Image (spheres, helix red, strand yellow):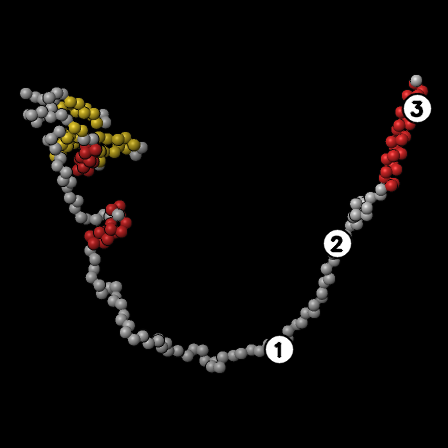
Amino acid sequence: MAFSATSLSSFSSLSIRTTRFSVLNQHPLPNNLTPKSKASKPFPVFPFKLTSTTKLKAADSETTFFEDPSLQEEVVFEPTPPPEGFVPPPSFDDGPMETEDEIAAAYEEIYGPAYRFGSKVKKEKVRDGFEERVVQVRRVTKVVKGGKQLHFRAVVVVGDKQGQVGVGVGKAKEVIAAVQKSATNARRNIITVPMTKYLTFPHRYCIFCSVLLVDLMLEL
């Protein structure tokens, strides 16, 4: 049985191989499917044409000269005449001189109030119905590297006597500037105080402004 199994396996392998080679031999591949080795193409060589160079001679070029050799002669310039109906513009110096206020107003109209560059026009006082009272003015100093800087600190209270009141603090190098800053700051801190028929507030009221505490109380 062992001999028959080995002989059968060898026979089957031989039969498969013979059938494979026989099929290839019976049906050969067409010419368009057969692999072909690609031949390397030679590098294309471009033909170069040699051009002949020609040298110019001095006799071939023409030289021109001025007809009049006197170059120092004065030439009179004659402008073209103006067209008909031409009116020359007025000179810049002939117009009226503008004042500094007019120039400042023109700049402010074009560029806004930031470009006023020191106009001497007096600013009108704000009329909003509030009265200003200066409560305190003190002199304060600040120690810096170069020494001490002197400033003024002002406290201002504004109100309309109808329940609207505000307290402000301002610092500046001058007293007037400090009062103006504190008045502006007071208008930003306006509060409403409850009123009675006697036009006053019925209880103690505290207002905090920065580090300042203001006590408002009724005195009978």
* Residue type pointed to by label 1: Asp
Report helix, strand or loop for mark 3. helix
Bin the neighbour count of mark 2 within 10 Å (Cα to Cα): few under 14, some 14-19, many 20 and up. few
Determine whether label 3 and label 2 are within 8 Å by CB.
Answer: no
* Residue at horizontal 11 percent and vertical 24 percent from the top: 201
**What is the spatial separation of the Cα atoms under label 1 and label 2, in whole angstroms?**
46 Å
Residue pointed to by mark 1: 60
Q: In the current view of this chain or complex, which residue is farthest to the top?
A: 1
Per the image, the residue denoted by label 3 is 7
- Residue 200 or 36: which is nearer the viewer? 36
Q: Nearer the viewer, mark 1 or mark 2?
A: 2
Horizontal arrangement in the rendering, residue 170 relative to residue 163 (left or right):
right
Q: Position of residue 183 (x, y in %)?
A: 18, 35
Q: Is residue 192 above or below residue 53?
A: above
Residue situated in front as seen by the camera: 76 or 90: 90
Per the image, label 2 sits on a secondary structure element best described as: loop
Residue 185 x, y percent position in the rendering: 21, 33
Q: Viewer-nearest of labels 3 and 1? A: 3
Q: Can residue 109 be seen at all in this image of the molecule?
A: yes
Dot label at residue 169: none
Is the residue under label 1 in contact with that under label 3 (CB below 8 Å)?
no
Q: Earlier in the sequence, mark 3 or mark 2?
A: 3
Residue occupying image coordinates x 24% and y 48%: 116
Residue 159, how many percent across, how many down? 13, 32
Choose between 80 and 163: the one closer to the eye. Answer: 163
- Which residue is identified by label 2? 43
